[in-house]
Every structure is written in structure tokens, then in C-alpha cells.
Image (tube, coloured by chain):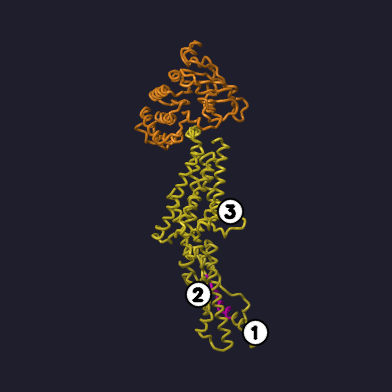
């Protein structure tokens, strides 16, 4: 197990403009390099906001977020080379093909043409997109669209990969294939930071988790140890045990 | 991107060319109802015919005004009509006798200055369809007035000659005295002294090419808004390359498209127009200046598009505002109405339109035969406006936390 912090959040405070109540206040979190880390919580708990802060999509003033030791707040774009991001929304140009999307986002990630070509070929093979790589993405099936979304996020072989619901709306086979690919990616050294409401899938992927509610970490640690500690057989039981069964807005 | 500008330039040039021809070569039908029985009305018709502006159709003398206007309403080709009153010759004769009498008195000779009807205004009545434009109506009015004056002058001269010599004015002398041999020479003041007369093509192709280039606003601003609203934008913001670079790349591609648009339209003006009966476009001698102006015009157009794209919230907003604002900028910029014909208040506003400076620069090259140094005064404001649009784009991106 490596002990270098892939993500180190210290004393983070953040509130949306016009909202009195902060989403986070004095928030701390450390995710080690090489981990498959799951961030879970009910709706409105702050998971997506936290991912947006870690990827620089939302600016903040108080506290610190470091990715592999580099402060994200410093507006140094080189920190963006360290990570990839798979947003929940399909993030590509639908009128372009998978190959064109990968080439475009790869170039903006700082890769050279040959590097993109080599990486794309490998990715399309692994994700089963080779035959469809030249078809406009908007004409592909939902599962293929998700795989294209994933391929774009990992084209630059990131050291950290943020995943926000990467398998939402796909069939079992596609979900299984994506999770297997993510595990393979992790074995090659990529730290995964994953959030999802599909807890059975999360259980098979994540070795460490943090449960967030109302902007605070209510439990953090090794998945199996936390289940054992709270007397739960699975992640879903643990989740309901710690966050309650009441509806959330 | 290419089809519509080409169509626009061909249609507008054809129509404008036909309007020029209407005055210069094509004859307009002129209905004449001559109620006069004297010679002078026939002489007037003859002089009007010699202007070569009209195809004269004589109507029966008993046709009244109602019948005449009814005929004009039913036939779109018959836009103009003239009624020559029954006393036309009589009044001109009376006036001629009066003027001759006064002239005789002035010479110290006996002359009759008490002539019946000489104080009453004579003349003809011109009827026209309201669709006839003011400028064309003025041209018709001028031609008919000139014919009237000639008939009147001839008659005065004849009467005066007869009063002095008691002989008729010899035809040869009458011809020498009245037929104007002096001409008005027209010389376009071009910088290259080529002295070639500008035509509808030289006026319209540059103007409508600019209009087409600025219509890139609809496509580019819409694309930027679509990108901002798409999921792809979230990913763009997390990439190492700043979004401004991505936006700049987009602008470069669109700039290439606008330059290509201009090249295609100019090529059509040079090679296709003569084949479809329109005057060929003469390209300026300074091709480098032409390329430079086209590049700056294109850059200004894409900068304006980027600015709208950054500030617009929806694609509908970008498309609607973009298209309408280009039409407004074209109108105040002198693309639709010539700059010299604009009211004074608009002449100041006109300078705020980038299309005005583009047009001035192109006209400097296409019509005045200028070179790069001659159009710098138009290029500098254009570059300033372009930089303003770019600065607004950056400020907009920063204000919206997009960079």
C-alpha cells in the first residue's frame, strides 16, 4: 500500500453564492495514491460538490485541496494533467465520432497525435468500441455512449480518475465491463475516486469508502472493516444504518 | 455557409444591375394622352422620345383621367402617364410672344407685351404608380421638364426671330442655336487613375460579401452556446488547456471559413457573372491588401460571434440577437443605403458599425483602386473594434467563471 496522498483536503470551507449555509465547513479528507476510493451519501450530501471542488470546476477560498501535492487553488493548469474526469452527464460532442472526440479531448489534454492514436486504439479494443469508433456518438447505444464517455476521460492515462456515476443507465454487461476495466486501470497505478448510488457495484469496486452527510464525513475506512464494525453484511445496509431511512431532498 | 452568400450576391447584383439598366438602357412605358391640336405638343412628344428613356404609347385624346388611371392599375408595366392639355400649344405660344415682345422693347423696338393667357401657367400633368421609387420619379421628372424647356425655348426663339426679321427661323440656325452640343463628362475619381466606371457588381459584391461573412455569427455563437450547455463543456473546464485556447481554435476555423466564403464569392463575381449577363467583378490591383482586408473583416466577424456566444444564455438568444444585430449593423453601416445618403445623425452612429469600416476598406480597393496605405484609415478602426470584441469575450468568460 502506498502512502502518498493522491488527494489531500484540509480545512475546506465552501458555500454556494447566495446560500447562507455552507456545504462544507472545516472539511478534511485524505485519499492515498493507488486506492479505489468510494464517496457515498444521500442526495444533497455534498458528494458532487466535493468532486467539483477537487476537479477545479468550483472555485473556493478557504482551505486547501492538493492533488499529488499540487494545490488546485493556485490556477496552475499543470495540475489538470494529473487527473481524468468522468462526469455523470455524457460529456462529448455527439455529432463527432468516438475517435474524433478522443482525438479532440486528447489534444487539449496535451497529448501528441501519435500518443492519442496509440492510446485510443488500445482503449477502443478494451472497451469494445473498435467497430463503432468512426460512427457519430449520438448514433450509438446508451452503453456504448457510456464507454465513449469513459474512454475520453482516461485517454491521458491519468494518475487520478474521478468518476461520477460512470455506469448509470447501462445494462449489466456494460456495467460489468466498465468496472472490470476500472480495476485494471487501478492495477496499473491510477487512483480511483468514485461516487455512485449503485452500492452493489461500488462494493465490488471500492476498497476504501467515506460516507458523507450534510457536508460531513460520518464514516471512513476500509469497506469490509466498516461493515463489520457496524454489524452490516453489505454496503447498502451500512449506508442505511448510518444515514437513516428518511427521504432526502 | 457558402450557398446562401452566393445566392444573395447573385440575386442582389442582378436586381441592382437591372435598376441601373432601367435608367440607362431599358425603356419605361410612358402613356401620353395628347388633347392638344397644336404643333408644340407633337414637338414635345418628339423631344421626349429622343431622350431614349421612354417607350411612348399614345392614347386617344378623348380618354379621361379615370380611364387613364384605371388602365395603369390593371397593367403593372404602365407606371407613367402624361396628359397634355388642349391649350398646351396655345399657352406656350402666348408665353413666347410675351417674352419676345419684352425682348423687343428691351432692344428699343416695338413689341407687344399684352398677350392673352400669357400669365397662366402651362405644362403637362405626370401620373405615376406609387410603386415608382422617388429617385426614378425624379429622373423622369427631369427628362420631361428638359423636353418642355426645349420646346418652350424653341418657340420663344422662333417668335423673337420672326418679330425682328418677319421671316421664319431657318432650320439650320434653329438647330445650331438650340441643340446643346456641350456634354457632361463623368470621371470616377479613382486612386489608380484607371477611370473605369463602377457598376452594380463592383458595388454589390464587396458589400454583400461582408454581410455574408458577418452571418457567421449565427453559426459560431450558436455553437459556443451549445457547447456551454453541453456536458462536453464540463470536461473542457477540467482539461489542462484553458477554455480560451479552445475558443480561439474555434475562431481560427471560422476565420478560415469566412476568408474562403469571400474567395468563393469573388471568384463567382469574376468568372460566373459574365456568363449570366452581369458585369464581371474587377479585382483590385493590390491583392495583398485585398487578402488583408478580408482577413481583418473575417476576424472582426468571428470576434463579434464569439462575444455573442459567450454572453448569450440560450441558442435561440444567440441566433435571434446575432441575426437581427447583423442586419441592423449592415443597415447603419451603409450596406443597404449608401453612407452619403444617410441622415446626419446616422453618420455618427454609422462609425460604430464594424461593417461600415469593412465596406469602406473594400470600396477603397474595389472602387477607388487604392492600395494598402490608402485604406489604413479604415483598417485601424476595424482592428480597434475587433480588439474590443475580443476583450469583451475574455471579460465575459471571466465574469461567468469559464476561464
- Give above or below for B146 relative to B211: below
Q: Which residues are magenta?
A: B82-93
Q: Nearer the viewer, mark 2 or mark 3?
A: 3
Residue highlighted by disc 3: B351
Closer to the camera in the image, A220 or B4: A220
Residue A163 shows up from this direction? no
Residue drawn at point x = 47 percent, y = 28 percent? A83
Residue highlighted by disc 1: B106
Q: Which chain is yellow?
A: B
Closer to the camera in the image, A46 or B369: B369
Residue highlighted by disc 2: B45
Q: Chain A: give its colour.
A: orange
The subunit letter for the residue under badge 2 reads B
- Give the CA distance from mark 1 to mark 2: 33 Å
Closer to the camera in the image, B6 or B196: B196
Q: Have a look at marks 1 and 3 and say if they share a chain.
A: yes
Amino acid at each position: 500500500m502506498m502512502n502518498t496522498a493522491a488527494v489531500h483536503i484540509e480545512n475546506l470551507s465552501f458555500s454556494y453564492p447566495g446560500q447562507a449555509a455552507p456545504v462544507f465547513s472545516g472539511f478534511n479528507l485524505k485519499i492515498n495514491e493507488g486506492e479505489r476510493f468510494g464517496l457515498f451519501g444521500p442526495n444533497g450530501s455534498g458528494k458532487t460538490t466535493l468532486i467539483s471542488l477537487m476537479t477545479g470546476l468550483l472555485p473556493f477560498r478557504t482551505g486547501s485541496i492538493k492533488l499529488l501535492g499540487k494545490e488546485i487553488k493556485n490556477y496552475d493548469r499543470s495540475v489538470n494533467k494529473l487527473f481524468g474526469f468522468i462526469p455523470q452527464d455524457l460529456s462529448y460532442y455527439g455529432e463527432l465520432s468516438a475517435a474524433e472526440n478522443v482525438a479532440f479531448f486528447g489534444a487539449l489534454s496535451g497529448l501528441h497525435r501519435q500518443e492519442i492514436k496509440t492510446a485510443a486504439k488500445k482503449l477502443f479494443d478494451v472497451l469494445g468500441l473498435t467497430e463503432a469508433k468512426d460512427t457519430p456518438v449520438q448514433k450509438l447505444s446508451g452503453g456504448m455512449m457510456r464507454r465513449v464517455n469513459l474512454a475520453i476521460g482516461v485517454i491521458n492515462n491519468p494518475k487520478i480518475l474521478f468518476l461520477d456515476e460512470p455506469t448509470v443507465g447501462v445494462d449489466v454487461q456494460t456495467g460489468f465491463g466498465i468496472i472490470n476495466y476500472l480495476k485494471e486501470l487501478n492495477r496499473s497505478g491510477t487512483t480511483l475516486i468514485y461516487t455512485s448510488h449503485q452500492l452493489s457495484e461500488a462494493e465490488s469496486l471500492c476498497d476504501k469508502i467515506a460516507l458523507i452527510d450534510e457536508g460531513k464525513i460520518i464514516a471512513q475506512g476500509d469497506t469490509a472493516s466498516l461493515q463489520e464494525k457496524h454489524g452490516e453484511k453489505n454496503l447498502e445496509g451500512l449506508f442505511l444504518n448510518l444515514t437513516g431511512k428518511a427521504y432526502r431532498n | 455557409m457558402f450557398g446562401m452568400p452566393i445566392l444573395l450576391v447573385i440575386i442582389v447584383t442582378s436586381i441592382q444591375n437591372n435598376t441601373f439598366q432601367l435608367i440607362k438602357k431599358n425603356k419605361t412605358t410612358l402613356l401620353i394622352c395628347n388633347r392638344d391640336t397644336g404643333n408644340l405638343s407633337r414637338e414635345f412628344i418628339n423631344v421626349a422620345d429622343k431622350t431614349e428613356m421612354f417607350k411612348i404609347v399614345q392614347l386617344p385624346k378623348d380618354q379621361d383621367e379615370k380611364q387613364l388611371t384605371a388602365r395603369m392599375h390593371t397593367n403593372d408595366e404602365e407606371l407613367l402617364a402624361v396628359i397634355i392639355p388642349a391649350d398646351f400649344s396655345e399657352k406656350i405660344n402666348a408665353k413666347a410672344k410675351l417674352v419676345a415682345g419684352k425682348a423687343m422693347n428691351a432692344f428699343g423696338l416695338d413689341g407687344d407685351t399684352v398677350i392673352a393667357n400669357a400669365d397662366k401657367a402651362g405644362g403637362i400633368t405626370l401620373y405615376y404608380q406609387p410603386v415608382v421609387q422617388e429617385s426614378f420619379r425624379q429622373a423622369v421628372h427631369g427628362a420631361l421638364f428638359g423636353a418642355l424647356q426645349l420646346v418652350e425655348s424653341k418657340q420663344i426663339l422662333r417668335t423673337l426671330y420672326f418679330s425682328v426679321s418677319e421671316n421664319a427661323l431657318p432650320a439650320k440656325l434653329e438647330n445650331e442655336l438650340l441643340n446643346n452640343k456641350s456634354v457632361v463628362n463623368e470621371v470616377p475619381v479613382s486612386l489608380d487613375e484607371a477611370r473605369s466606371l463602377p457598376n452594380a457588381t463592383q458595388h454589390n459584391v464587396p458589400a454583400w460579401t461582408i454581410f455574408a461573412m458577418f452571418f457567421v455569427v449565427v453559426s459560431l455563437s450558436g455553437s459556443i452556446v451549445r457547447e456551454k450547455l453541453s456536458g462536453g463543456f464540463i470536461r473542457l473546464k477540467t482539461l489542462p488547456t484553458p477554455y480560451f485556447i479552445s475558443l480561439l481554435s474555434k475562431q481560427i476555423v471560422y476565420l478560415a471559413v469566412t476568408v474562403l466564403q469571400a474567395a468563393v464569392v469573388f471568384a463567382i463575381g469574376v468568372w460566373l457573372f459574365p456568363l449570366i449577363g452581369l458585369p464581371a467583378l474587377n479585382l483590385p490591383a493590390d491583392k495583398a491588401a485585398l487578402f488583408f482586408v478580408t482577413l481583418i473583416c473575417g476576424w472582426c466577424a468571428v470576434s463579434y460571434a464569439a462575444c455573442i456566444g459567450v454572453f448569450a444564455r440560450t441558442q435561440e438568444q444567440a441566433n435571434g440577437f446575432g441575426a437581427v444585430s447583423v442586419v441592423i449593423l449592415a443597415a447603419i453601416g451603409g450596406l443597404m443605403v449608401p453612407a452619403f445618403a444617410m441622415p446626419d445623425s446616422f453618420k455618427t452612429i454609422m462609425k460604430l458599425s464594424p461593417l461600415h469600416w469593412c465596406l469602406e476598406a473594400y470600396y477603397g480597393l474595389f472602387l477607388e483602386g487604392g492600395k494598402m496605405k490608402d485604406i489604413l484609415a479604415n483598417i485601424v478602426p476595424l482592428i480597434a473594434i475587433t480588439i474590443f470584441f475580443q476583450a469583451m469575450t475574455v471579460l465575459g468568460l471571466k465574469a461567468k467563471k469559464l476561464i
